[in-house]
Image: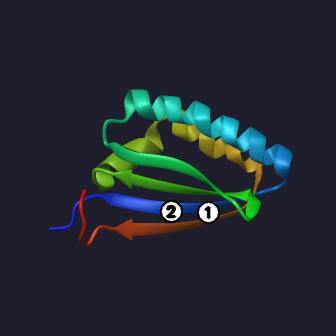
Amino acid sequence: MATGFGLVVRFTLRDAEAADAFDELVSRTLNGIRQHEPGTVVYVNHRVPEEPNVRVFYELYRDRAAFDAHEQQPHTKHFLEEREKFVTKTDVTFLEHIDGRV
């Protein structure tokens, strides 16, 4: 039986200044995730070396309920509101676990 619920999110940011501010916002958000979200297994912000104004998130949750709980956290709601100042495009791909080591 499949377990886990994940997503990959690609953010295109306005410019280098927006990218720096976005990274700072993500760091603050991660503090809340670490402290209040036991169902969040992985939440990582990646820089794309050839595209300095792109960030890619990989998120993995224990299950769909953990993701839904993440969406309701105050730090997540704050991130979702504030990110619009920095982002020009967002692409989301939801993932379902088939096989592999968890």
Residue 9's spot in the image, x, y percent?
Answer: 56, 61
* SS label for mark 2: strand
Question: Residue 79: percent from the left, percent from the top?
Answer: 61, 40
Q: Which amino acid does label 1 sit on?
A: Arg
List x then y, in percent, for residue 6.
39, 60
Residue at 46% over, 36% down: 73
User: Mark 1 falls on what kind of element?
Assistant: strand
Q: Which residue is drawn at 56% across and 40% down?
A: 77
User: Within the image, what quadrant is residue 88 found in?
Assistant: bottom right
CB within 8 Å, label 1 to label 2: yes
Rendered position, 95 above or below 59: below
Which three-letter amino acid code belongs to the residue tagged 2? Answer: Val
Does residue 94 sit above or below 76 in this rendering? below
Q: Judge the density around disc 1: few (<14), some (14-19), many (≥20) Cα neighbours within 10 Å.
A: some
- Work out which residue is located at the far bottom of the displayed protein and give it: 98
> Relative to residue 38, is residue 58 drawn left or right?
right
Q: How crowded is mark 2: few (under 14 residues within 10 Å), some or many (20 or more)?
A: some
Name the quadrant of the N terminus.
bottom left
- Per the model, the C-alpha gap separating discs 1 and 2 is 7 Å
Quarter of image, res 87: bottom right
- Residue visible at 39% across and 68% down? 95
User: Which residue in the protein does label 2 denote?
Assistant: 8
- Percent coordinates x, y for residue 15 in the rendering: 85, 53
Is residue 7 rendered to the left or right of residue 66? right
Which residue is at 28% across, 54% downward?
63
Picture disc at residue 33: none
Question: In this figure, which residue is indicated by the disc labeled 1?
Answer: 10
Work out whether 49 lies above or below 32. below
Residue at the left extreme of this rendering: 1
Instruction: Tell me the quadrant of the picture where the C terminus can be found.
Output: bottom left
